[in-house]
Image: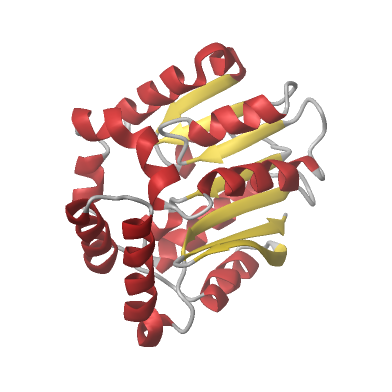
Amino acid sequence: MADVQNMFSDPQAVARYTEGPPRFVPGYNAMLSMAAILLAERARDDARILVLGAGGGLELKAFAQAHQGWRFDGVDPSAAMLGLARQTLGSFAPRARLHQGYIDDAPEGPFDGATCLLTLHFVDVAERRRIASEIRRRLKPRAPFVVAHLSAPNGEEERPLWLSRYSAYLAASGVEPDQAAAARNAVTNHLEILTPAQDEAILRQAGFSDPTVFYAGFTFRGWVAYA
């Protein structure tokens, strides 16, 4: 976890961050579009949306472009990444309030929807459950929660196979071999990957209903669930 924190505070890594997700996450931009659609199914035109792990600002900008009336509270522990989010948002920045910290530093809401994208794989199971519970507590009844992160079918048994497939995807996408190897090593050595069944159980334990997969890209999965 310390290595991850160092990465998000390194000026060079932060400056290059917005190049990463579209290259390293299969179908990243499509996933953001789908997330906006799922939020909009129940979020009103003037919705207030909570975005946990908002550093970099890519999802904030995508949501702001898709829905002109939405306003956002973005939360991230890295001041440098929040600075990048402001830069990424550009003219949309006045519609987003950015908060440095973790879920406990998020406003109480109530929010019309929430997202947590490419974030929960950085924390252990107990903290994932606590974060999910705190997000649900801040949502209006039946409000949507969209979440996506690393999740490998059949756990440890098939994890090496899925990581090999992910490495092959990176190579096919033009990622340099040393970058691809570093990405795989980071996942293998520093992140706790659960199975989709375990991830769905966490959502249910946190009080969410009807968790449904809407996105799958090799080692990544995304769900929508409801408060």
* Position in image of residue 69 (x %, y %): 75, 22
* Position in image of residue 114 (x %, y %): 63, 43
- Quadrant of the snapshot with the N terminus: bottom left
| Residue 134 horizontal side relative to residue 14, left or right | right
Q: Quadrant of residue 201?
A: bottom right
| Residue 68 horizontal side relative to residue 220, left or right | right
Q: Nearer the viewer, residue 214 or 46?
A: 214
What residue is at 46 percent from the left and 60 percent from the top?
A: 128
Task: Using the image, determine if residue 92 lies above or below residue 11.
Answer: above
Task: Using the image, determine if residue 194 lies above or below residue 15.
Answer: below
Q: Quadrant of residue 157?
A: bottom left
* Position in image of residue 115 (x %, y %): 59, 45
Q: Nearer the viewer, residue 55 or 26?
A: 26
What residue is at 60 percent from the left and 63 percent from the top?
A: 206
- Quadrant of the snapshot with the C terminus: bottom right
What residue is at 68 percent from the left and 41 percent from the top?
A: 36
> Is residue 77 shown to the viewer in this render?
no
| Residue 84 horizontal side relative to residue 5, left or right | right
* Position in image of residue 116 (x %, y %): 53, 48
Q: Nearer the viewer, residue 172 or 121?
A: 172
> Is residue 122 shown to the viewer in this render?
yes
What colouring style does the render use? secondary structure
